[in-house]
């Protein structure tokens, strides 16, 4: 999925309440660091779940929130994205041994294979 997104020219970022060192270590351990153009961590201000964190990350990337998608594994992530004006907000429950109880108002992925990347199509 990350390769397909990169090949389609989709800009990807991580927003997390982990510190920057933790995010960097995880991405490096999964050989994914080169797939992400930006990170927003607990070291940044404002922090998740403040919608201003999403707005600041979007500004850093030079992308309007209504041209973005956010995939989150917590209801606070989903609400944060919605409040920030993100167009596509998806839950992801498969990253845990016991899936978190995500708000059913948001579509929820059970596996990354449920997503498709269509080059040339744009959000918003």
Image: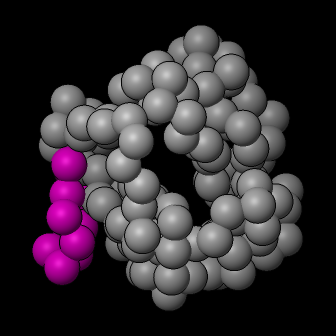
Q: Is residue 43 left or right of residue 28?
A: right
Q: Is residue 68 visible?
A: yes
In the figure, residue 74 lies in which quadrant?
bottom left
Taking the magenta stretch, the answer to whether it contains residue 72 is no
Task: Give the residue at x 36% y 49%.
Answer: 121
Residue toward you, 115 or 7:
7
Q: How many marks?
A: 0
Segment tinted magenta in the rendering: 97-109
Taking the magenta stretch, the answer to whether it contains residue 101 is yes
Pick out the residue farthest to the front: 120
In the figure, residue 119 lies in which quadrant?
top left
Which quarter of the rendering shows the N terminus?
top left
Which quarter of the rendering shows the C terminus?
bottom left
Q: Is residue 98 visible?
A: no
Q: Position of residue 97 (x, y in %)?
A: 24, 37
Give the answer, above or below, for where 69 lies relative to 47.
above
Task: Give the residue at x 25% y 36%.
Answer: 116
Task: Give the residue at x 40% y 42%.
Answer: 120
Residue toward you, 7 or 80:
7
Q: Is residue 41 left or right of residue 113?
A: right
Q: Position of residue 75 (x, y in %)?
A: 36, 72
Task: Give the residue at x 80% y 35%.
Answer: 21
Q: Position of residue 80 (x, y in %)?
A: 51, 78
Q: How is the image coloured?
A: one colour
Give the answer, above or below, for where 19 lies relative to 118.
below
Magenta portion: prevailing SS class:
loop
Residue toward you, 79 or 4:
4
Q: Position of residue 69 (x, y in %)?
A: 44, 59
């Amino acid at each position: 999925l990350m390769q397909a997104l990169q090949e389609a020219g989709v800009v990807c970022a991580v927003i997390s309440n982990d510190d920057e060192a933790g995010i960097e270590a995880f991405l490096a351990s999964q050989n994914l660091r080169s797939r992400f153009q930006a990170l927003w961590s607990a070291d940044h201000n404002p922090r998740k779940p403040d919608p201003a964190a999403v707005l600041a990350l979007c500004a850093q990337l030079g992308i309007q929130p209504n041209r973005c998608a956010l995939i989150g594994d917590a209801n606070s992530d989903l609400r944060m994205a919605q409040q920030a004006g993100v167009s596509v907000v998806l839950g992801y429950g498969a990253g845990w041994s016991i899936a978190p109880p995500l708000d059913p108002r948001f579509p929820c992925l059970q596996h990354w294979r449920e997503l498709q990347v269509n080059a040339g199509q744009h959000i918003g």
